[in-house]
Image: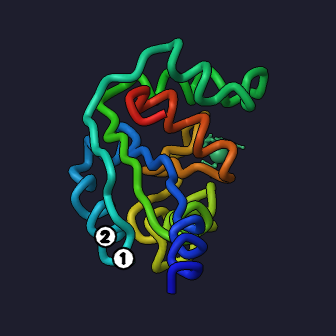
Amino acid sequence: MTDVAPALTETIERTLILVKPDGVRRSLSGEILRRVEAKGYTLVAVRLLDATPELLAAHYAEHEGKPFFQPLVDFMLSGKILAVVAEGQGVIPGFRALAGATNPTEALPGTIRGDLGRDWGLKVQQNLVHGSDSPESAAREIALWFPELG
Ligand code: DAT
Ligand code: MG
């Protein structure tokens, strides 16, 4: 058994989840965390905060220069964000599957964006949640939002 346990624990991963300002404003934080917990993932850290332009520029660096970049930053500054670190085997793709497609019109029923989100006709999609898309992104984003865990 001693050679099995370390191999299993090495597969545990962490992801950064954000309940965006639309989710907090619409009082969906609890429903979203409920789905993460009901799936079986563990909440490692949770923080309600106001983002800053600097934090968002770093977080969304890959989108700089795209037409929706400034609307996205303005939207993310429009209210409180619930930042969460969740843990479990496969949690990075697992939460992306729970979240659903980026465009809430296309997100399938059963997903957070499919069940709870819609297109509001704005310059940026307000789609309730962010989830890290790779182990590299997760490590980078967790260090940004939870420096004490990085
Ligand atoms: P995701 O959040 O699914 O990883 P992303 O990283 O490509 O999507 O984009 C970040 C956010 O920007 C996304 O959640 C919503 C918004 N967005 C992306 N593409 C968009 C587009 N073509 N039009 C409007 N908003 C968009
Ligand atoms: Mg993304």
Q: Amino acid at mark 1?
A: Gly
Disc 2 residue type?
Glu
Q: Residue at x 49, y 44 (%)?
A: 126
Q: Residue at x 48, y 47 (%)?
A: 16
Q: Position of residue 31 (x, y in %)?
A: 26, 64
Corner quadrant of residue 41: bottom left
User: In the image, is 45 to the left or to the right of 30?
Assistant: right
Q: Position of residue 146 (x, y in %)?
A: 40, 32
Among the 4 quarters of the image, the one containing residue 18:
top left
Give the left or right position of residue 107, taking residue 112 as reference: right
Residue lying at the far bottom in this picture: please name it.
1
User: Is label 1's Cβ within 8 Å of ligand 1?
Assistant: no
- Residue wearing tag 1: 40
Tell me whether circle 1 and circle 2 mark residues in contact (CB < 8 Å): yes
Q: Which residue is mark 2?
A: 37
Q: Is residue 15 visible?
A: yes
Horizontal relation, residue 109 to residue 40: left or right: right
Q: Nearer the viewer, residue 122 or 74?
A: 74
SS under mark 2? helix
Disc 1 and disc 2: Cα gap in Å? 5 Å
Give the answer, above or below, for where 7 lies relative to 132: below
Q: Residue at x 48, y 72 (%)?
A: 111
- The residue nearer to you, when weighing 90 against 80, is 90
Q: Residues within 10 Å of mark 2 (few under 14, many from 20)?
A: few
Front residue of this view, candidates 58 and 140: 140
Q: Is residue 147 above or below residue 34?
A: above
Callout 1 crowding tier (Cα within 10 Å): few <14, some 14–19, many ≥20? few
Q: Say which element carries label 1.
A: loop
- In this view of the protein, which residue sits in the foreground, 44 or 83? 44
Q: Position of residue 33 (x, y in %)?
A: 30, 61
Residue 110 horizontal/vertical position (percent): 46, 79
